[in-house]
Amino acid sequence: MRYYSTNGKAPLATLQEAVTQGLAADKGLFMPERIVPLPDDFFKQIDKLSFQETALQVANAFFGEDIPETDLKAIVYDTLQFDCPVVKVKDNIYSLELFHGPTLAFKDVGARFMARMLGYFRKKDNNTGLVNVLVATSGDTGSAVANGFLGVPGIHVYVLYPKGKVSKIQESQFTTLGRNITAVEVDGVFDDCQALVKNAFMDKELNEHMTLTSANSINVARFLPQAFYYFYAYAQMKRLGLADNLVVCVPSGNFGNICSALFGKKMGLPVKRFIAANNANDIFYKFLQTGQYEPKASVQTIANAMDVGNPSNFARIFDLYGKDHAAICADIDGMTYTDSQIRNTVARCYAENGYLLDPHGACGYQGLEDGLREGETGVFCETAHPAKFKNVVEAIINDQVEIPARLGEFMKGTKQSVPMTKDFASFKAYLLSE
């Protein structure tokens, strides 16, 4: 399989080149040159397959031309050592709990998969050079990537995060690790962190000095494996006899997660439609309404992992649908929620259903309450454990949120971070000194 750039001005790349480079030379995002449909028999028997078995067939459609099945199976099975159950919340609304991985957030799968894929390519080529992974985070990406790559030989990770704009627990998950993980605390917002990463990839001097790649969802090995979730969600709903007229709502920030879901639909996944739920950063919602994509500076919300004012993966979605606004709207509805609405949803769902949402999952749940039509069943992504937003959630429900043991261990560590301005020259000078 070859990969082309969404900007159309870079040469085709192999999978290994796309994963290692992260971003195409023309600043575009890599896209597979074709999408391999999955056979009808796969969907007929999907309810009888495990998460790992399901994911392996999906992974084979993505990567099977480039990685032998035995090696791909090892990567998939090593990545998926936890479950992502569907849980009934009320009537026709179910939660797909994506927070059972090592850092209790949905990004664990993509981060772990990418770490193992990079390790595979290094081993295949007997590569002894150091690969430097740059990742910008608005919350959960940093912890998932840091823990996914922790201790991986020959790889050093730099996590760039906005100062004062991630939760204390999220911050502790990537600032206390040390070893091959360096946290860079940027005096700015997420979009500033993302700009630093993108500018680094485009800087000739930096790239001559060190091998750079990204573990944000701009990397094909990070975002594509997230499609596993949606096939497995469909399988679980089919077991319940509820797979017909299925609608999936995805809380969306940088749009890597819902982008992977849309790839799944193009491969034949029988989901009727998707709902992209935004917080106050409603750029995609407005695009659906108007057909105009107008990025703007992000605003800080209590659903901080969605605080993105210029979502990178919009380019992929736009490309996937041939730049056809009507086609995009046919498959995706949009919702947007203020902090006040998110708080109300968390409180009401907890009181009425006994189910505790995190602020991001609350957008997904509310998106289904507002968007489901007659005869439809909805699944929303609960993307992170509520304890990762302990102070916010406790203030909403006026009750304590128990911290899982693995999160508590992170809180015991000592914060280690490098302060950084949002000026690229400062960041470049820092990397050149490394």
Image (spheres, rainbow, N blue to C red):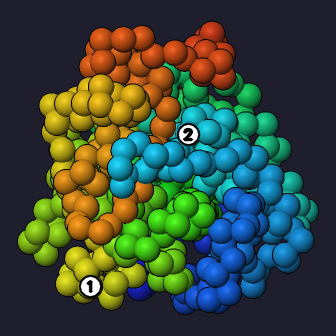
Comparing 92 with 146, the one in front is: 92
- Please say if 95 is above or below 395: below
Q: Is residue 107 left or right of residue 327?
A: right
- In space, the residues marked 2 and 1 are separated at their CA atoms by 32 Å
- Please say if 298 is above or below 355: below
Comparing 105 with 256, the one in front is: 105
Circle on res. 216 = none
Q: Quadrant of residue 285?
A: bottom left
Labels 2 & 1 near each other (Cβ < 8 A) = no
Instruction: Residue at 73% x, 37% y: name it.
Output: 150
In this orientation, does residue 358 appear?
no
Q: Residues within 10 Å of mark 1 (few under 14, many from 20)?
A: few
Instruction: Residue at 69% x, 77% y: name it.
Output: 45
Local SS, label 2 = loop
Circle on res. 99 = 2
Location of the C terminus (image quadrant): top right
- The amino acid type found where label 2 is placed reads Phe
Residue that sits furthest to the left in the current view: 290
Q: Is residue 74 left or right of residue 367?
A: right
Location of the N terminus (image quadrant): bottom right
Where residue 198 appears, as percent x and y from the top left, is 43, 56
In this orientation, does residue 273 appear?
yes
Comparing 67 with 397, the one in front is: 397
Where residue 308 appears, as percent x and y from the top left, is 30, 48
Where residue 74 appears, as percent x and y from the top left, is 85, 61
Local SS, label 1 = helix
Label whose residue precedes the other's in the sequence (2 or 1): 2
Instruction: Residue at 20% x, 84% y: name it.
Output: 326
Q: Where does label 1 land, which residue?
A: 327
